[in-house]
Image: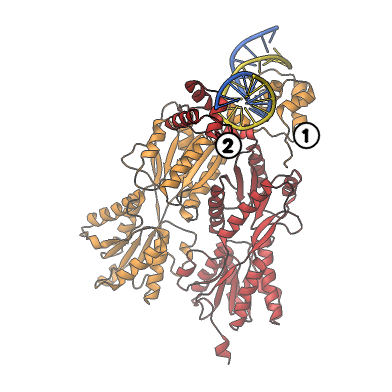
Chain colours: A orange, B red, C blue, D yellow
Amino acid sequence: MKKIPITIKAIAEELKVSPSTVSRVLNGQADQYRISKKTAETIQEYAHQQGFVPNQIARGLRLQKTNTIGLIIPDISNPFFAGIARSIEIESRKKGYFLFLFDSREDTGLEKESIALLMSKKVDGLIVSPVGISGTHLLKLKQQHFPLVLIDRYFPEIDLPFIASDNSRGAFEATNYLIEKGHKAIACIQGLPQAISNIQRVQGFKEALEKAGIPFRNEMITGTDFGVENGYTQTKKLLKRTSVPSAIFALGNMISLGVIKAIAEAGLKIPEDISLISFDEQPYSAFLSTPMTTVAQDKESLGKEAVNSLLENLSSQEYLNEKKLIPTRLIERASVKDINLIRK
Amino acid sequence: MKKIPITIKAIAEELKVSPSTVSRVLNGQADQYRISKKTAETIQEYAHQQGFVPNQIARGLRLQKTNTIGLIIPDISNPFFAGIARSIEIESRKKGYFLFLFDSREDTGLEKESIALLMSKKVDGLIVSPVGISGTHLLKLKQQHFPLVLIDRYFPEIDLPFIASDNSRGAFEATNYLIEKGHKAIACIQGLPQAISNIQRVQGFKEALEKAGIPFRNEMITGTDFGVENGYTQTKKLLKRTSVPSAIFALGNMISLGVIKAIAEAGLKIPEDISLISFDEQPYSAFLSTPMTTVAQDKESLGKEAVNSLLENLSSQEYLNEKKLIPTRLIERASVKDINLIRK
DNA sequence: GTGAAAGCGCTAACAC
DNA sequence: GTGTTAGCGCTTTCAC
């Protein structure tokens, strides 16, 4: 039922020239092949008038290159990943690449399936934010010399290129900030315990405590995943403790929403009764009734660097294993109270 | 630098059969062509063992069908569109289709460019949430019999298939709800004035007023776009008026965040001092300090129906122009005060 | 039951 | 300056 688009061959026949000539002109190689100005012009004109668009499928088959990259992320409806997808889309388009989008829904099976599908579609490379705790299926890609770069999540023990936020440093700075404001009893509500992003945030948290000489206790860290529900229930529990913390450090943007809810329900106020700092800036962070202090991740750079790292790998002879950490930025707002003054 | 994958031809040579036989077996047509069980098995086994994956580019060229659809949305970092992208991804994968993602960044030029690129990539069909006020470039696609379905935004005067929320009804119900709660002085903060989604919400708002016999005045509607900033500045202005409205109806999820901020800064409370209802439910809606009453859009259905409508069009001989409105759902929370009691 | 051959639309090596 | 030809990997008609 579709209208059949015009081909190079059809143009060639119409203009009584050979397909090669048409191809050369249309690919801007007219000069290089010293094709007469007249012929070139005629072809250009006719092609344009006929609305010729090269069939990229045929081109891809011939050139063994599709100018396409595959993106696999765990959840596009999570604003963090949506932001990353956006910057990857922008950067890859800028570089002349198409983007296949796959959402693995935090499911390793779907992730593997997606990889296979993308390979069959002959993408030139892959950007993936992997799910789960094993990366052996990704390592296999590397062994086949298939260009791949990980984003946000990676496996420290596996030598693959990745781009991620400097999570440990970001968490270190945030915790430090709380400590400077006089907080000692800090609770940290974590996300997925096995995700590297979470692990490193926890590590940064601990390092800051240690540096300040605050003894670490296991109950300072709770939480199971990056969801809203987790933030809510963990905070409820925290507020019931005999010694309630003076500050909460939420390791994800959804978690902090749950925290806010639980605090409000308990009739408490941020930051008067309890302080809050959250990992990952969101559009609404500044618009909550108490504007929230956050650790912003640079989603633009994350996406941009991932694309560029991948493209470098595409054109390189050897397999590059660039690993890059993007700095975070502490955005100070009103959700943390300085309790030093009171003490003195 | 990539490892060269195995082809049908290679399998055929290795197994001393013809490529056709291999192709037939691998496409599950062994029975149909009465290929001997033994041959079929050998081929299956060897192919699997060699990790054969069909080259979809070659297949696409031969079959003139790529099993790919293109998605163009104005902003993937807007959670509404991210949600839609997700449901489209899920549904299209379920149906065996790949998804090219393009973000038009609310730019008509980029949208047109994206369409051209996707056509050259030989996508089987297109789902687009169009930008701007003219749809003539989309109508052209239809004239070429190119399968296309619009989502969320469309052009009433142009006969193209679309899936959208029942925006006028949703806005009508929301406004009605405010009126039932005793509100008469209602301000409506709109989004992009020319977007059909906005136009229909405004219309629903007006209809509800009319039905209740509340005279409409132009100053009841303000606002310029779907951004946070717009909600903030418009609310600031509203609060400075001599007669401050008792309720605000925000026509987008980002707008309502701005409203909340402005109200908090003025030292007022929701819903005690002013009521708020917002179009479009978000994960944080329930977790704001005052849980927000919203008009939820069914993003799952929107995406799912769009894919199915497109696929129907793909397999149909004629050009279908299915137009479908998905019902919205009013989610009642705590941001609207019943002021009837006070009056009596 | 299986194979040979053509062709999808394009590009590039090799001709002249 | 331009044409001829082969071939990317696959499917399918026709042949036997």
* Picture residue at 51% right of the left edge, 72% below the top: B292
First in sequence, mark 1 or 2: give its number: 1
Residue B64 location (% of width, % of height): 65, 36
Q: Amino acid at mark 2?
A: Gly
Residue B206 location (% of width, % of height): 69, 74
Residue B320 location (% of width, % of height): 72, 52
| Subunit ID for the residue under disc 1 | A
Compared to residue B334, the image places residue A80 above or below, namely above
Which quadrant would the C terminus of chain A be assigned to in this image? bottom left
Residue B191 location (% of width, % of height): 63, 63
Residue under label 2: A96
Quarter of the figure with residue B84? bottom right
Which quadrant would the N terminus of chain A be assigned to in this image? top right
Q: Which mark is residue A49?
A: 1
Left or right: residue B328 compared with residue A269: right
Secondary structure of the residue carrying tag 1 is helix
Residue A331 in view of the camera = no
Quarter of the figure with residue A40? top right
| Subunit ID for the residue under disc 2 | A
Q: Nearer the viewer, residue A101 or A119?
A: A119
Q: Residues within 10 Å of mark 1 (few under 14, many from 20)?
A: few
Instruction: Give the Cα distance between marks 1 and 2.
Output: 24 Å
